[in-house]
Image (cartoon, grey):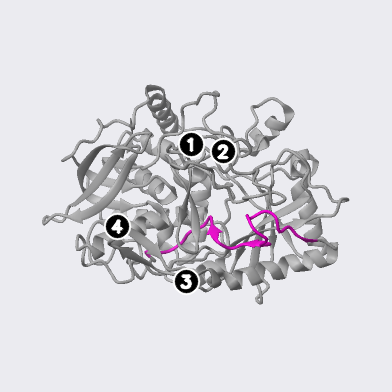
Amino acid sequence: MGISRRKLLGLGALAAGASAGVTTIGPAAAATSGDFVPALVIGSGYGAAVAALRLGEAGVRTTILEMGRLWHDPGHDGKIFCATTNPDHRSMWFRHRTEAPLDTFLWLDVVNRPIKPYPGVLDRVHFDEMSVYVGRGVGGGSLVNGGMAVVPRRKYFQQVLPEVDADDMYRKFFPLATECLGVNDIDTDYFTDSDYYEFARVAGRQAEETGLATTFVPNVYDFDHMAREEAGTATKSALAAEVIYGNNHGKRSLDHSYLASALGTGNVTIETLHQVRDIRQNRDGSYVVTVDHIDETGEVVESKQIGCRHLFLGAGSLGTTELLLRARDTGALPDLDADVGQGWGPNGNIMAGRANNASQPTGARQSAIPVLAIDDWDNEAARVFAEIAPVPAGFETWISMYLAITENPERASFRYDPATDRAVLDWRRDQNTPSVASAKSLLDRINETQKTTYRHDLFGDDRAFADDFCYHPLGGCVLGNATDNYGRLKGYRNLYATDGALIPGSLGVNPFVTITALAERNMAKIIATDITT
């Protein structure tokens, strides 16, 4: 895949910023209190990156405010990111200990490690009965996800977002998003022969022997690079257990795609370690954000107020919703719709592991990038899209691991708590009962045919199903409810949501391609009708 001149310029700007150790990347000087820019984008994940690129292309001077750091400079070991199996301070966002999805092995506390607090790349945001994994850094969740770039079933997409023209999405905006993200497919011969995908082949065969369908899943990881990793001609990343704390090589995260292109327009600047606290509107209709510039210890270096004409919220389902709730309920933006905070869901995420028989080893060497899924979405009684996930422990575990995405109609809402100045999620653990039942229905069938059972030693207690965390938070500012049909917040002009907060709780597959495509669709309309340069 070729690199455009614009993207090359953006990659150069990122490299220069990392080399200089600065928190401002791009053509503008570091923002100071009282500055005014035509457009501000809060966050640098998928929707935010699309907004920044399209604004930059339209000639609009744009500043991105990202609370995490830029991940382009090597650490003490010469690597930007640490491995999943050997985490250090780079792993987690201001934690004293890592909080990986798999908490134990054989009930032993051997997975998580004590670490020094630091603005690490992965955060686990805790609510009473649900926690949510999110990425921290320039590129947001693209830095820490498995890269599975799935376009949803058209019929289900139309059910979830009926007001969106599906013809436009599937003819124009999904193809545009997959192209710009750098989506590619694993070579089937490589998959069949690679020592690193025995875990997927075993689980795939077992599913097919049970009468279940499997499907290859596209990815933003460069599979040509992966083949070179195995051949010994490229530095290992996916094949060196790198994924949840970032990939040092091979992965086309947003800082290598949309954000690089945005910087290459010469109109976009990124301010890192800038955490937005609140937003308000001036009498003239412009907006002011209050933002804390923090250092790598988490201390506030400076608090600033930055003005803009157009404000795009791309801080993710959690961040965007919290900022809007705070603004509405403190009276800063009192005319925001009552639907802000509603329609949240975890995309039916459930994790589970099966214990294979001794004759079914899954391989001591495993790629950290998933490429195969069990597709049982047509089963109306229990819809499941179960991704076959690796367990890259470095030794044989005989575990088949799954991240099941299920259909679950349960939704939750956020409320603003003035005592803590935070958004509180009212999701209850028992709301995941339909998701657990669906995942169990699928995996029970495999266990029956294979004469196998579940692993009960992986999630810190005796559970077979992990139902208290998710990777795919969706909703909180649902398209067509809290916003109009293009993400404009009701009650205000030039105020937009542009991320997973727009999708009401469930999508049936990994959501980032849909978030990207929806942002492309919305920005095309907004640039054409709302933006003047």
Helix, strand or loop at label 3? It is loop
Helix, strand or loop at label 1? It is helix
Looking at the image, which residue is at 54% across and 40% down?
245
Which residue position is annotated with label 4?
421
Looking at the image, which residue is at 19% across and 60% down?
332
| Residue 521 appears in the figure | no
Q: Nearer the viewer, mark 2 or mark 4?
A: 4
Contact (Cβ within 8 Å) of mark 4 with mark 1? no
Q: Nearer the viewer, mark 3 or mark 1?
A: 3
Name the residue type under label 1.
His
**Quadrant housing residue 368:** top right
Q: Residue pushed farthest front?
A: 108
The magenta stretch spans residue 474: yes
Numbered mark located on residue 256 in the image = 1
405 or 264, which lies in front? 405
Contact (Cβ within 8 Å) of mark 3 with mark 1? no
Numbered mark located on residue 411 in the image = 3
Q: How would you rate the neighbour count of disc 1 (Cα within 10 Å): few for under 14, some for 14-19, many for 20 or more?
A: some
Label 4 – label 1 distance at C-alpha: 35 Å
For the record, the magenta segment spans 453-477
Location of residue 307 in the rendering, given as x and y in whole percent from the top left corner: 19, 46
Q: Is residue 171 left or right of residue 288?
A: right
Label 2 – label 3 distance at C-alpha: 33 Å
Location of residue 374 in the rendering, given as x and y in whole percent from the top left corner: 70, 60
Helix, strand or loop at label 2? It is loop
* Mark before the other along the chain sequence, 2 or 4: 2
Label 3 – label 1 distance at C-alpha: 34 Å
The main secondary structure of the magenta stretch is loop
* Mark before the other along the chain sequence, 3 or 4: 3
Which residue position is annotated with label 2?
251
228 or 406, which lies in front? 406
Contact (Cβ within 8 Å) of mark 2 with mark 1? yes
